[in-house]
Image (cartoon, rainbow, N blue to C red):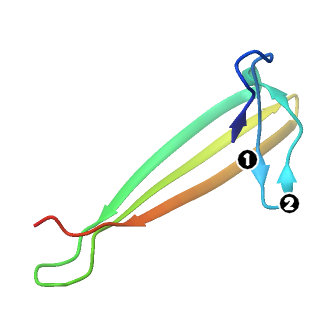
Amino acid sequence: MEFAPARVPASLRLVRGAGPDDWLPVTTLRRVRLTHKVVEPYQGDHKSAVSTLAWNSSCGTSGRGSSFRSAVTRSGSRTR
């Protein structure tokens, strides 16, 4: 999801692998859901913990809608 620069009317667009969608007013944003999940290794395992931040957004008006999902996963070093 990309938001327009500060001096431009409040708008956003979804950016996908095939390229960005058209600009939409921010008021069309209906829902944003963030989910954070951490998977810890079991005692004695040498693997790092894995943290995943996923988000799902919904935009659209009058029957025309668009949904977008994305996730970022990061493995970190163990701190124990």
Q: Is residue 45 shown above or below 1?
A: below
Q: Is residue 46 shown above or below 3?
A: below
Residue 18 placement: quadrant: bottom right
Which residue in the structure is indicated by mark 2?
18
Who's the residue at 79% across and 61% down the image? 17
Q: Is residue 70 toward the left or the right of residue 51 in the image? A: right
The type of residue carrying mark 1 is: Ser
How crowded pointer 1 is (Cα within 10 Å; few <14, some 14-19, many 20+) is rated as few
Q: Is residue 23 toward the left or the right of residue 50 in the image? A: right
Which residue in the structure is indicated by mark 1?
67
Marks 2 and 1: CB-CB under 8 Å?
Answer: no
Q: Position of residue 16 (x, y in %)?
A: 77, 55
Q: Position of residue 36 (x, y in %)?
A: 40, 52
CA distance separating discs 2 and 1: 15 Å
Who's the residue at 86% across and 32% down the image? 23
Q: Where is residue 45 in the image (x, y as percent from the top left)?
A: 18, 84
Residue 44 placement: quadrant: bottom left
